[in-house]
Amino acid sequence: MGTLRAAARFLRRQPCGSPPLAREPSTPFAFWSSDGAMTREAAGAEAPVPTSIAARARAAVAPPSAAYLEGLNAEQRRAVEATEGPVLVLAGAGTGKTRVLTTRIAHLIAIGRARPFDILAVTFTNKAAREMKERIGALIGSAGEGMPWLGTFHAIGTKILRRHAELVGLKSDFTILGTDDQLRLLKQVIEAANVDEKRWPARSLAQAIDGWKNRGLSPEQVPAGEAGAFGFGKGGKLYAAYQERLATLNAVDFGDLLLLCLRLWRENPDVLTGYQDRFRYILVDEYQDTNVAQYLWLRLLAQGRRNVCCVGDDDQSIYGWRGAEVDNILRFEHDFPGAVVVRLERNYRSTGHILAAASTLIARNEGRLGKTLRTEEGAGERVTVTGAWDSEEEARLLGETIEGLQARGHALSQIAVLVRISAQMREIEDRFVQLGLPYRVIGGPRFYERAEVRDALAYLRLTANPADDLAFERIINTPKRGLGDATLQALHSLSRRQSVPLLHAACLIVETEELKPKPRSTLRALLQSFSRWAKLLEIQPHAEVAQTILEESGYTEMWQKERTADAAGRLENLKELVRSLEEFPDLPAFLEHIALVMDASEAEGGERVSLMTLHAAKGLEFDTVFLPGWEDGLFPNQRAIDESGRAGLEEERRLAHVGLTRARRRAKISFAVNRRIHGLWSSTIPSRFVDELPESSVEVIEAPASFSYGPSRFDRQPTPFGSSYATPGWQRAQANTAGQDRFGGGARSSRSGPKQIEGTLVAKSTGTASDYATGARVFHTKFGPGSVAAVDGNKLTVDFDKAGRKMVLDSFVQPA
DNA sequence: TATACTTCTATTTTT
DNA sequence: TAGAAGTATA
């Protein structure tokens, strides 16, 4: 967990929690003086440095010789040097996007256009922010020290809100709720509104609210139709109630960090002008991932000086499902008239065939600005496509290929396996374990999201802030100490009646007869512990106190007693948590930052294959990339298509594009003809994306000899390969899998006619017509009865009575 | 409170 | 199928 410490160190360098100053209407920007760096400017009234003659003179001299500009290509250089006015940098995969961004910042500083604290640079992840900071440091050394406004949207939003909390009805020490706190709160809100929580789960409400917040909508702005869609028309009210609860708790959720900034600025134009003035230059990373709220946030700020530079790639927009609006990037020139658009199309990462494959694929998308990636590398190896009988075999082939590469000296750390959904990982992991192939999974549950860490944090939160009701509820009966629902109910009602926090209510209640003796004494003891810990905090190092809290509360013991496999890991995490506390000056400082930094711990190093989802792979690169599971339904994912139609399909295609462009030298696509979906085996059809690849850059791998392993459970299934599809991909797929003699031996293979001659598939573009006619009634073992809606070769489109319209192979249905 | 059983669901995930 | 979450029972 070294990253945690690194993150801690990183954060400590940019203090976000400076106490807010009282607002002074006459001098609206008094707050700037709270920041040491700002005072210097305050003296110079209006923009002294950038417009000074000296600066302009320096600007005219510096560039040509600047070392940091060396090695940039013409487009990159243009993107760096177009400092004034709106700029959109369309940076294709592997074209040096981060380099441009960091060099641009270095350039602004070097030529005296801006000082580090004049520049607002926003990213989406802490990781990206950290990386940028490091790279800027490398470019210009200490001159870039302390870019105080380089960070994630949320971190910067937090920083701004803490300064003006009172203006939006908060106290400056507001709590930032994590997902689990949010859910617990919503559950309460739902219950309080008398809505059936089973029918309308907190999860879906959270999703709806997040969606609204992503679009910048406050409760009253939510369209009536949408608000009514949840909980029999109560959705809007629930949202409002939730916001009210947040306000009373002096808490915000992630969406609020942006939304409240918008409110702050709209209601206080003087504050807005202050920030517009402050940020001479604005840079945005991954602009294609911005949602509406972020867009509005940026637009408000950029309206001031209009020096806004957005870097992104519409072809890598893969987060539409969580509110990202590709439209933001597509609309940039419209939003910022006169914008300079720079396209970075020279790819420094991949070889020709890989780039050709990725480009041809993505060219199918309609809604895109269009770029043509080019490389000066050679053509390199073709992208391979391999078919496997089932997902187990796919994993087996994957393992063998990797072992083969390893034997030829390929570094495992330069190999990645990118899957569409995490469920695909299991079989692959199983195989790797069997082979003894070292691997690492990237992504997955984050340190601060683990239950034990959140519990421990709740103890610390409550100690530091007795008014933290959510923390109180979380740990009141964890570990189990007999303070159950009844006690909590009593506390809740008292807390509401007296309008005091739960902990305070608890103090009151133990003095009454309301509780039964047993819980009363338990509660009293717990309260005493908390007040003792709070006092301890003043005299002992906070990390030690944390340790004490976890021990005395019985929390550590709870896990020690637990004899499950992961208990040891949990204890280890608790230790790590305490250790990481030492990195912060005090407990509040730690807690304040924890909410925003949820970094995945990437245990670097080690010769391991990386395994992750395609989403997690964005921004990474490897020599060899495996892309298993290219099957229709899985990838492109059926649900994405069902839910978002064409847009969904295009986003899936962008995902495929992202996957391919991760590869430097080798991209290896594979699919299985049979896959277990939710425990049931079903037959699948190769991804339509396979067919969208350019034949000239693709090589179809013949089924290797190793296919001759023992019989599988499918031997008795009807052959899936009756005939062929019209598409080259399908034919290739057939050719690949045809080597297996069992394909011919299916018990009911007769339906589709003999298509195999000694293991070689006769691939005909027309395919063999199915015996079924439109309108025929058929039965499918998985989907049940249905009627044939269309026939295409041996591909049937069937309207199933229950399962709806599906495309299946005729060999998988029987006449009904 | 602990456990055994049932029911439900099942992309992608940062802040 | 497998995991979580909820329910029933001792």
Image (cartoon, coloured by chain):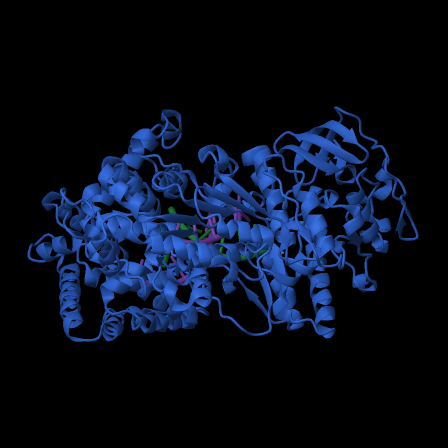
Chain colours: A blue, B purple, C green
Q: Is residue A603 left or right of residue A708?
A: left
Q: Nearer the viewer, residue A767 or A666?
A: A666
Quadrant where the C terminus of chain A is found in the figure:
top right
Image quarter for residue A132?
Answer: bottom left
Q: Position of residue A420 (x, y in %)?
A: 59, 51
Q: Is residue A38 left or right of residue A178?
A: left
Q: Total marks drawn?
A: 0
Q: Is residue A29 visible?
A: yes
Where A793 falls versus A31 (above or below)?
above
Quadrant where the N terminus of chain A is found in the figure:
bottom left
Extreme residue toward the top, this view: A775
Q: Is residue A546 left or right of residue A214?
A: left
Q: Residue at x 83, y 33 (%)?
A: A770
Q: Nearer the viewer, residue A179 or A372?
A: A372
Q: Position of residue A647 (x, y in %)?
A: 57, 35
Q: Is residue A96 left or right of residue A169?
A: right
Image quarter for residue A422?
Answer: bottom right
Q: Nearer the viewer, residue A646 or A103?
A: A103
